[in-house]
Image (cartoon, rainbow, N blue to C red):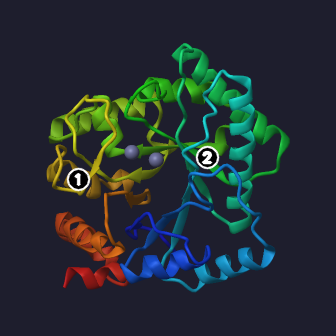
Amino acid sequence: MNKNKLLLGGHVSISGGLHKAFKEGESIHCTAIQIFTKSNRQWHAKPISSEDAELFKNTLKNSTIKSVIAHASYLINIASLDDDTSVKSRDALKDELERCDQLGIKYLVLHPGTRGVAEQKDSLKRVADNINEIYANNKIQTIVLLEIMAGQGTSVASRFEQLAEIYSHIKFKDKVGICFDTCHAFAAGYDFRTKETYENMWQDFDKILGIDLLKVIHVNDSKKDLGCKVDRHEFLGKGKIGETAFKLLFNDARFINVIKILEVPIETIQDYVPQFKLVLSLLSEKNLEPIKDTPLAILTK
Ligand SMILES: [Zn+2]
Ligand SMILES: [Zn+2]
């Protein structure tokens, strides 16, 4: 049903109830949304009642939004070699995956974490060990997506090779995928601002990780320069990445079915709308065609 439809949206709020996210997303013409299933700055949340889970699933069924993904709490650090932090983080990730399962959410995006004083290699292995432990001991359908990081501080996994190293240790290969964040990758040193650099980067991605692992793209411009290792999102077209890269990305046939979520520094939810219009203006005639009977169509007028 979703075949060749542009899955585009923003990160939206769940205040007032999980199912409220759909109304918020619909108000800005999204075809996909990203949510936190709980406060992203707290370890614990009250469990989701079966009534709330049903309400969420029914609202999705009747919504013009076709895809919903979740982002895990920023507190979770399954890369930590400190045993207390590691176990606490693993428990929290398990809890978030179970919440997603309950809501029928297929993908949970996770920041791989920070290593502190530990070696990168050991932290990458720890990420995989914790993920293996969760899927070995729990029946969970939801897939965890490792997000590429900007390389700020001691954050791990800002290189394709490092993500691949985590993946090489994963025992449940179909439970793990990748979320590519354009701002993070650019800050980490990946240049994709011209046709040539864009193609080279994705060839590397394919060689090192495999294009099929890519399930979500966080589409963000960067306030800071190439390779700065600082994670500062900017509105599309207003940052250092520029429109050419996004034009290439949104017209790339390989990524037609990849969910694309904006996480730009909005003040109100309506600030997404001009950004979606910009995206649609970058689409070629051929790629504009499939959005015809979606809520996005109204933004092309
Ligand atoms: Zn993220
Ligand atoms: Zn970021």
Label 2, residues with CA under 10 Å away: few <14, some 14-19, many ≥20:
many
In the image, residue 234 above or below residue 12: above
The x and y percentages for residue 279 are 24, 65
Which residue was labeled with disc 1? 246
Label 1, residues with CA under 10 Å away: few <14, some 14-19, many ≥20:
many
**Lower position in the chain sequence, tag 2 or tag 1:** 2
Query: What residue sits 43% from the left and 56% below the top?
Result: 258
Residue type marked 2: Val
Residue 76, quarter of the rendered image: top right
**Residue at the farthest front position:** 42
In the image, residue 38 above or below residue 132: below
Query: What residue sits 17% from the left and 43% below the top?
Result: 240
Q: Secondary structure at mark 2?
A: strand
| Front-lying residue, 124 or 251 | 124
Q: Is mark 1 within 8 Å of ligand 2?
A: no
Q: Secondary structure at mark 1?
A: helix
Residue 61, quarter of the rendered image: bottom right
Residue 273, quarter of the rendered image: bottom left
In the image, residue 153 above or below residue 291: above
> Could you tell whether 6 is left or right of 300 in the image?
right
* Disc 2 from disc 1: Cα separation: 25 Å
| Residue 144 marker | 2
The x and y percentages for residue 204 are 35, 29
Q: Does the rendering let one see residue 294?
A: no
Query: What residue sits 32% from the left and 78% below the top?
Result: 296
> Could you tell whether 40 is left or right of 91 in the image?
left
Q: Quadrant of ligand 2?
A: top left
Q: Quadrant of the C terminus?
A: bottom left
Q: Does the rendering let one see residue 9?
A: yes
